[in-house]
Image: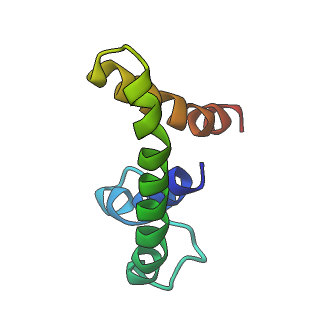
Amino acid sequence: MVPIFLLWYFASNGPLADLGWTQREPTENDGMLLWLVIIAPVVVAFTLLWWLANYPVRRRIPLDSRLYWSASALVTVLPTFTLAVVL
């Protein structure tokens, strides 16, 4: 949930705010470079761990590869979207 939240926070305060689709946080005035320095390692580490955890499981499950990875990605982002809707 943390990497997905960080990506959303960056997008909503950066590119989406520039397009006028969201409003920036009024206290967020440090710039976007700091967020990229924080977000990039977190997202890369999460993606690597996610792939390393799912790759051996994928080899054992008799499903189409595209179906497995799509379902796995959906199950990964589902808690974040659920909390976003509830809160």
Q: Residue at x 38, y 82 (%)?
A: 33
Foreground residue among 44 and 6: 44
Residue name at image x 38 percent, y 50 percent: 21
Which residue is rendered at x = 43% and y = 24% of the image? 60
Q: Is residue 74 above or below residue 50?
A: above
Let me know if residue 10 appears in the view.
no
The residue closer to the viewer here, 21 or 37, is 37
Residue 6 x/y as whole percent: 52, 60
Q: Position of residue 46 (x, y in %)?
A: 49, 56
Color scheme of the displayed model: rainbow
Instruction: From the viewer's perspective, tell me whether residue 2 is left or right of residue 69.
Output: right
Q: Is residue 61 above or below residue 7?
A: above
Q: Position of residue 2 (x, y in %)?
A: 59, 55
Q: Position of residue 72 (x, y in %)?
A: 45, 30
How many numbered discs? 0
User: Does residue 10 lie above or below 87 as drawn?
Assistant: below
Instruction: Residue at 62% x, 35% y: name it.
Output: 79
Of 81 and 64, nearer the camera is 64
Is residue 19 in view from this perspective?
yes
Which residue is farthest right? 87
Figure quadrant of the C terminus: top right
